[in-house]
């Protein structure tokens, strides 16, 4: 196992981040809710609400507007180094977490698929493994997020270059939990 970094942010998507019909779909990070703990399992993620209740993420199988893709995207993971790179390209609009990943680890640099393809694990401060994640695919970029990041509608000529930059894991990775566990801000993300 290779340490990646401590978990800096956990969040859930209470609803879809993209709305509207093509080609006029829009992106908004408004449905994102930071949480201190996530319950992860094969069906997706639940976030610990401020009142102690569990809130269902939109990628969880049980969400009424579920975006659950046969378990392939129940949990998503990103890295602060990716946000640094996106902020350098798109500006201050890019805040850590705005792309919607459930788990964001504090780590410099960029992690490509070959860096995480064998899976990830989340380890408690005492060294106990909380849960493993199978990395299923990169979170491919989309026109609505790219337009939101730029603060304007994307010119078709410029879109291709921005999408290429945001691909290959820059927008994070879709994962599925192998087993179940509760993870917390401050836990360590490791590559297996």
Image: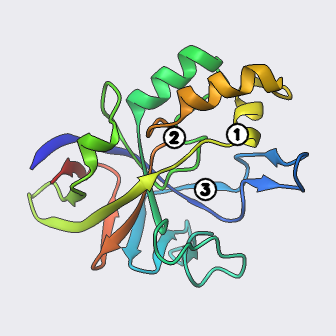
SS class, disc 2: loop
**Circle 1 sits on which residue?**
145
Numbered mark located on residue 33 in the image? 3
SS class, disc 1: helix
Which tag is nearer the camera, tag 1 or tag 3? 1
In this rendering, position of residue 183 left or right of residue 22:
left
The reply to whether residue 117 is in sight is yes
**Mark 1 → mark 3, Cα distance in angstroms:** 18 Å
In this rendering, position of residue 100 left or right of residue 152:
left
Mark 2 / mark 1, whichever is N-terminal:
1
In this rendering, position of residue 57 left or right of residue 4:
right
| Circle 3 crowding by C-alpha within 10 Å: few under 14, some 14–19, many from 20 | some
Quarter of the rendering containing residue 150:
top right
Q: Nearer the viewer, residue 108 or 118?
A: 118
Q: Is residue 145 above or below residue 62?
A: above
Q: Nearer the viewer, residue 186 or 16?
A: 16
Asked if the residues shown at circle 2 and circle 1 are in contact, with their CB atoms under 8 angstroms apart, the answer is yes
**Circle 2 sits on which residue?**
171
């Amino acid at each position: 196992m290779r340490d990646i970094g401590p978990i800096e942010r956990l969040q859930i998507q209470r609803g879809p981040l993209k709305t509207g019909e093509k080609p006029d779909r829009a992106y908004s990070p408004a449905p994102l809710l930071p949480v201190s703990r996530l319950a992860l399992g094969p069906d997706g993620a639940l976030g610990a609400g401020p009142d102690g209740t569990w809130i269902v993420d939109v990628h969880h199988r049980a969400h009424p507007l579920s975006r659950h893709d046969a378990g392939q995207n129940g949990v998503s993971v990103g890295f602060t180094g990716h946000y640094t790179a996106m902020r350098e390209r798109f500006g201050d609009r890019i805040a850590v977490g705005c792309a919607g990943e459930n788990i964001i680890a504090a780590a410099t640099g960029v992690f490509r698929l070959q860096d995480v393809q064998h899976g990830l694990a989340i380890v408690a401060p005492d060294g106990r493994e909380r849960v493993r994640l199978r990395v299923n695919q990169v979170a491919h970029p989309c026109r609505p997020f790219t337009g939101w990041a730029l603060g304007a509608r994307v010119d078709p000529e410029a879109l291709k270059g921005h999408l290429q930059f945001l691909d290959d894991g820059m927008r994070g990775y879709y994962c599925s939990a192998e087993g179940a566990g509760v993870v917390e801000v401050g836990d360590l993300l490791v590559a297996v």
